[in-house]
Image: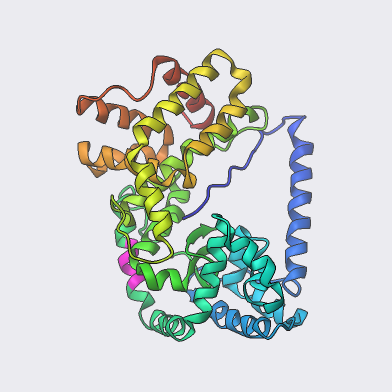
Amino acid sequence: MARPTILRSAPDGDPVSRPLVFALLAICAASVARSQTQAGGAQPPLPQTGADYSAVDQFYVIADILTKDAEPTDAQWNAMLATPGYRLVAQQDKGFRRQMTIAFKPSAGPSRDSVLRRDSDAAYQLRHLISAYGLRSEVLKIRRDLEASVADSVARAVRTAARFLPAGTTAGRKTPFLGFAIFADDGYALDGGILLDVLYVKENGLTDLLAHEFHHAYLSVVDKMLRPLVRTPDDVAFAGALRAMRNEGIADQIDKPYPLPLRGNSLDVYVKRYNDTYARTPQILRSIDSLLVVVADSPSVFSAAGTRARALLWSNSHPNGAYVARTIVETFGVDSLMPAVYNPFAMLRTYAAAEKQRGNPPPFSAKAITVLGEMEKRYVRQ
């Protein structure tokens, strides 16, 4: 699942925003330089298509050293971090090297125990890394199986993703590059390719996971939503929350039925919360409506309201977006999702129409609809 990154741009000729753009470019360049240094020097571009598994092998090289309470050399760390898989991991997790150390060094036991006592993403990640180390033979078998069968899975995944995209979206386009690694129970569509954890694939299968991430990648090609403007920063968080609802809600139609099944593994904690949050979507949307009403009366609180909306829409809006999208599909059919591909606000209008068709109360009040309409004018090409 890709976490949407909202970039702020400015219209050409804006005398205030241009210095900011140049400053941001300088910061980005410095960040790239630092990441290249940490990974052992300048890196070649990631492949545009195909798949790479070298990160899986390097994971065990480093883990074996750490379990002896030794410290890998810079060259050994760089060999791991320079693999395509871990270059993609670095986009999501700047602290992965530290997590590896805490997970496997015997002397890091107190820190490890402290993290594992918490109900947190860091704890889930540590458990995953430790599990992957203990399941080495099974993980490496999956790695070998993937090399032999990934082409067939990719072809099926493209066809599956295409069902929830406008006709012709995938035709004539290379499939995104796939980087396999061991990092967490997750997958992402990122700049440069799609990142998937091999143990996660073992537990959940590959085709639907790939199709979900392919949907994100292809959606970025046809997405017509404008980036938030520098001069209107207060509603950025709210716009991002609604965009995530569209992104994840449609993609979850591919690989997340409701209710998600319990499988007796570490993901069951997530599954239970996903199912509970999905079922509470109408209540959560009423809370979103209340926030929009407050904004209508007091625009100065837009930023705080957006932060609250992000918090209400747990897991980057996955379960609530899935509820909204599935309601549309079950009421009007898959084709009724297509306007949302080009305009995230259209999904909310279609959802409201679906609820009306079902005889349910409208999800959004008149004031909320007004605020959503104003946001749509700012962010969507007319």
Q: Is residue 80 left or right of residue 171?
A: right
- In terms of depth relative to the viewer, which is nearer, 152 or 305? 305
Q: Is residue 52 visible?
A: no
Image spot of residue 281 (x, y percent): 36, 36
- The residue at the point 77 percent across, 63 percent down is 34
Which residue is located at x 46 percent, y 84 percent? 140
Q: Is residue 279 magenta?
A: no
Q: Which residues are magenta?
A: 153-158
Count of residue discs: 0
What colour scheme governs how the chains and residues are painted in the rendered image of this protein?
rainbow
Q: Is residue 266 above or below residue 169?
A: below
Q: Residue at the top extreme?
A: 297
Residue 159 seen by the camera: yes
Above or below residue 22? Residue 358 is above
In this view, the residue in front, 258 or 232, is: 258
Q: Is residue 328 above or below residue 231?
A: below
Residue 19 percent coordinates (x, y): 79, 37
As drawn, 141 above or below 270:
below
Magenta-colored segment: predominant secondary structure: helix
Q: Quadrant of residue 32?
A: bottom right
Residue drawn at 68 percent across, 62 percent down: 95
Residue 309 image position (x, y, % from top left): 51, 33
Q: Does 4 sit left or right of 204 as displayed?
A: right
Viewer-side residue, 57 vs 374: 57
User: Where does residue 313 sit, x and y in percent of width and height?
Assistant: 47, 39
